[in-house]
Amino acid sequence: MQESTITSKGQTTVPQAIRDAVGATAGARLVWHLTPDGTVVVRVKNRSIRDLAGLLKQPGQRRVPVSDMDPWR
């Protein structure tokens, strides 16, 4: 288990082992979620939605326009 302390300014240092495990580098954004049971979940926002562009494209697969995906046309 890793620990850190919150300063009087509300700042803390993420332990090196945690930064390494999640791939967080200087300037990485942290997203905080508070669940109904009081658990805090912290995620590193180190990828953009644009990083997913082309992820599902198969070689030789043709592009389908959004208008062709509309089942009500």
Image (tube, rainbow, N blue to C red):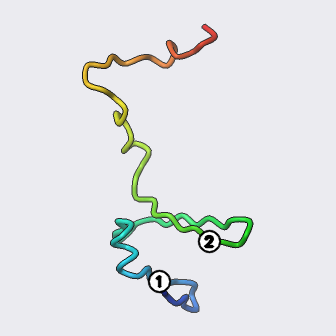
Query: Quick check: 2 left or right of 17?
Result: right
Earlier sequence position, callout 1 versus callout 2? 1
Q: Which residue is mark 1?
A: 1
Q: Position of residue 41 (x, y in %)?
A: 58, 67
Q: Observer-nearest residue: 52 or 56?
A: 56
- Amino acid identity at mark 2: Val
Q: Find residue 14 and report its image quarter.
A: bottom left
Q: Residues within 10 Å of mark 1 (few under 14, many from 20)?
A: few
- Image point (54%, 68%), residue name: 42
Task: Give the structural element (helix, strand or loop) at label 2.
Answer: strand
Left or right of residue 69: residue 39: right
Residue in the image at 73% along x and 69% along y? 37
Q: CA distance from mark 1 to mark 2?
A: 15 Å
Q: Which-is-in-front pick, marks 1 and 2?
A: 1
Q: Position of residue 21 (x, y in %)?
A: 36, 70
Is 47 situated above or below 10?
A: above
- Residue in view at x 34 percent, y 33 percent: 54
Could you say which disc has been placed on residue 40 in the image? 2
Coordinates of residue 69 in the picture (x, y in percent): 52, 16
Other-residue count near label 2 (Cα within 10 Å), few / some / many at <14 / 14–19 / ≥20: few
Of the pair 35 and 50, the residue shown nearer to us: 35
